[in-house]
């Protein structure tokens, strides 16, 4: 394996050695970088012409943190002994040096990068630099002394907030907190740091070891109360996660037993956490996120994204207004088209309300609100569509209406214009049936609310041109969405994978399981809400319309329950009507409904299903498996049919589109932790008991037969077979 970065050292005539971290793109701290740093440092310490040090990063970035490929399940990385990094290199080499060291921070100082800076005797920063310890996002804790030094520099309460939320602070705020000692422009940064280092040598500025600072630490009694409160908050916010609690324990060890004891506890905990399932899952998500925009046969053709200057959105309902909001927030001029004045005014008002909500939360200034609104233009016809570069259709799910719209768009839009549909279930070939330019048609499936949810499913047909895909990938980046490129089929990737989610719940309930127990177990597993609470939220009208698409296209494996239609007959349509599977008060708070059992009994009598005593006493583990293994089974079909490029894309789609817990690594990654054989055997057993809904697909069966992980691509599987 080649070298992963290094450091460069230059000694100036002033006697200051400047050590620069070089490991593009973010100067991450690999073991190679740290070894090189130590060699440079040791050499300069022994030189008589070196009075002091400055450490900085190449090309305007201090360091983005520790090399993440060293964590998770990457066994090819050589790992040093615990404590070697945090204690020997950072504490006993840098902090204990006989010559002062000043950090010159620009761009990023995150994770291990900030930890090295905190071990220096002073820190200078640019006002816009970002400083933070985001390690908890990867299932680990700061492992280079950050748990001990940050509380001593900014106080315990702020340090806990920064670590537990993983939110960085800008240089300006870091200065007011005491995390950095001075602010300067990027051009003057290294020069100012050199002078600061010489001032320490000349006793004109203090020589401070942050590990032994105590002036910012709260008195012990108060500190223990702060830690106790932080623990309660961490348990409430993430009941399934241990590493935030470990982080608090390590911080406490340093406060109670002293920083040196804290460092060793930190080193020990870091070693254990880096091998945990949570860390492996979150590191998998980290790398998978970066891989979603790499599409073989598309992004490797050397195509350059075209400049999309103006976008039109058809339909100002909930989805259309959300899409328009996302676009104007990223400075795209938008034309919103509706069928009449009343609908158009309602759409424009929805967009303004979306923006006002951001102003109230402090995410948007009044000035930027005005700027965003000025980018929006309303219309009732296609007259102004002559210069639009992209149209996104977001009208109701009606095939003939969408076909008519696309035929019209071809007449009024320029020949290069991208024709996109936000349909969530309808086949794009059907939508574009009456058009000639099928190479311009693409799915741009946003998730509700479109200006908030991070996922964008980009759906390609066999005719969609690679150029159009490259263009939409670029737009998704501009509007801060994570793209997943998928093939064209009913429900595409996310909705198709998860249609068995609610259906499995309905099957269990009709056979004796409790609605509210299922929802509670699935929420405890880590989903934002269980299947029944979700149906109430989206509304029964949408649930039935979507269900019909799946019954039509996958009749042999859809579970046809009468429960939702029966509820809807009684004007119970979910949260909007204040009655669904739950009852809702004025604040939309859900509570169980004792009347629900009558509807369940009626549904049973219509379908002729009998209660299974085993399901009446169903255990938590069995609920999780019976709800999610059918989802895994459908995800396998999506992979087997080539609808998704790779399994990791489905992991990202499940996390960002459906809220599957990221600390479980996504739907396929989680499934592989159980093994294809186990999942196959369970589905096989249930299909014998409860019918075709559970029948394992060929993709799953083939992998189970050979014990191959589900995430292995078809080509890799064939080569193994």
Image: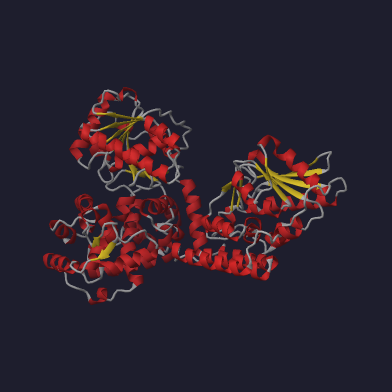
Residue 485 visible to an observer of this rendering: no
Q: Please give the name of the residue rendered at 67% of the width and 41% of the height, measured from the top-left corner.
A: 58
User: Which residue is more in the foreground, 91 or 696?
Assistant: 91
Q: Can you say which quadrant of the picture contains the C terminus?
A: bottom left
Identify the image's colour scheme: rainbow, by chain, secondary structure or one colour. Answer: secondary structure
Residue 343 visible to an observer of this rendering: yes
Q: Please give the name of the residue rendered at 44% of the width and 40% of the height, measured from the top-left corner.
A: 364
Q: Provide residue 718's location: percent of width, then percent of height.
A: 42, 54
Residue 624: name its quadrant: bottom left
Q: Please give the name of the residue rendered at 15% of the width and 56% of the height, measured from the top-left corner.
A: 571
Q: Please give the name of the residue rendered at 22% of the width and 66% of the height, measured from the top-left corner.
A: 593
Above or below, 270 relative to 186: below
Q: Residue furthest left?
A: 606
Left or right of residue 557, residue 201 in this image: right
Q: Provide residue 42's location: percent of width, then percent of height.
A: 80, 53
Left or right of residue 250, residue 500 in this image: left
Q: Give the number of marks.
A: 0
Left or right of residue 53, residue 558 in this image: left
Above or below, 24 relative to 39: above
Q: Provide residue 25's location: percent of width, then percent of height.
A: 60, 42
Q: Provide residue 436's location: percent of width, then percent of height.
A: 26, 28
User: Which residue is more in the foreground, 242 or 220?
Assistant: 220
């Amino acid at each position: 394996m080649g070298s992963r970065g290094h450091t460069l050292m230059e000694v100036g005539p002033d006697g200051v050695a400047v050590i620069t971290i070089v490991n593009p793109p973010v100067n991450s701290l690999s073991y190679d970088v740290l070894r090189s740093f130590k060699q440079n440092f040791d050499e300069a310490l022994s030189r008589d012409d070196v009075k002091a040090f400055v450490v900085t990063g190449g090309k305007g970035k201090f360091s983005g943190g520790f090399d993440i490929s060293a964590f998770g399940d990457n066994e090819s990385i050589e790992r040093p002994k615990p404590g070697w990094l945090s204690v020997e290199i950072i504490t006993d080499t840098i902090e204990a040096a006989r010559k002062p060291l000043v950090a010159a921070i620009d761009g990023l100082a995150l994770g291990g990068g900030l930890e090295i800076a905190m071990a220096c005797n002073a820190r200078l920063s640019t006002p816009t630099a970002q400083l933070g310890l985001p390690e908890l996002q990867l299932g680990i804790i700061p492992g280079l002394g950050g748990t001990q030094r940050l509380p001593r520099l900014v106080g315990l309460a702020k340090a806990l907030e920064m670590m537990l939320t993983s939110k960085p602070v800008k240089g300006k705020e870091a200065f007011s907190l005491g995390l950095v000692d001075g602010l300067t422009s990027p051009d003057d940064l290294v020069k100012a740091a050199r002078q600061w280092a010489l001032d320490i040598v000349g006793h004109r500025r203090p020589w401070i070891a942050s590990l032994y600072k105590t002036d910012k630490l709260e008195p012990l009694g108060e500190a223990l109360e702060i830690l106790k409160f932080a623990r309660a908050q961490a348990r409430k916010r993430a009941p399934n996660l241990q590493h935030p609690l470990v982080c608090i324990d390590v911080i406490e060890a340093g406060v109670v037993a002293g920083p040196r004891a804290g460092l060793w506890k930190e080193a020990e905990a870091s070693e254990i956490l880096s091998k945990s399932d949570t860390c492996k899952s979150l590191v998998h998500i980290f790398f998978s996120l970066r891989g979603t925009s790499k599409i073989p046969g598309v992004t490797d053709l050397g195509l350059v994204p075209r400049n999309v200057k103006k976008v039109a959105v058809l339909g100002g309902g909930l989805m259309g207004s959300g899409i328009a909001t996302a676009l104007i927030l990223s400075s795209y001029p938008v034309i919103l088209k509706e069928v009449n004045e009343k609908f158009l005014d309602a759409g424009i008002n929805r967009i303004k309300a979306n923006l006002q909500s951001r102003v109230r939360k402090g995410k948007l200034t009044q000035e930027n609100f005005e700027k965003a609104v000025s980018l929006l233009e309303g219309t009732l016809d296609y007259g102004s569509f002559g210069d639009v570069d992209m149209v996104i259709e977001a009208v109701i799910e009606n095939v003939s209406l969408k076909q008519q719209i696309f035929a019209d768009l071809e007449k009024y839009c320029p020949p290069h214009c991208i024709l996109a549909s936000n349909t969530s279930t309808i086949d794009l070939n059907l939508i574009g049936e009456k058009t000639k330019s099928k190479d311009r048609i693409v799915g741009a499936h946003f998730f509700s609310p479109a200006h908030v949810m991070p996922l964008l499913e980009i759906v390609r047909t066999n005719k969609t041109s690679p150029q159009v895909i490259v263009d939409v990938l670029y737009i998704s980046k501009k509007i801060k969405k994570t793209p997943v490129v998928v093939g064209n089929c009913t429900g595409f990737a996310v909705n198709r994978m998860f249609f068995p989610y609610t259906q499995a719940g309905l099957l269990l309930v009709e056979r004796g399981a409790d609605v509210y127990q299922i929802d509670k177990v699935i929420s405890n597993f880590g989903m934002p809400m269980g299947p029944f609470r979700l149906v109430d939220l989206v509304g029964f009208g949408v649930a039935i319309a979507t269900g019909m698409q799946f019954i039509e296209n996958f009749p042999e494996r859809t579970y046809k329950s009468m429960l939702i239609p029966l509820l809807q007959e009684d004007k119970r349509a979910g949260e909007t009507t204040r009655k669904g599977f739950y009852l809702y008060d004025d604040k939309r708070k859900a509570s169980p409904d004792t009347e629900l059992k009558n509807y369940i009994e009626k549904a049973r009598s219509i379908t002729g299903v009998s209660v299974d005593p085993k399901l009446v006493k169903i255990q938590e583990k069995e609920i999780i498996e019976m709800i999610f293994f059918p989802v895994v089974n459908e995800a396998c079909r999506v992979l087997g049919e080539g609808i998704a490029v790779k399994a990791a894309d489905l992991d990202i789609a499940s996390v960002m589109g459906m809220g599957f817990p990221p600390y479980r690594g996504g739907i396929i990654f989680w499934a592989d932790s159980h093994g294809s054989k186990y999942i196959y055997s369970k589905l096989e057993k249930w299909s014998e008991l409860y019918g075709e809904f559970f029948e394992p697909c060929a993709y799953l069966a083939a992998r189970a037969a050979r014990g191959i992980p589900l995430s292995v691509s078809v080509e890799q599987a064939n080569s193994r077979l």
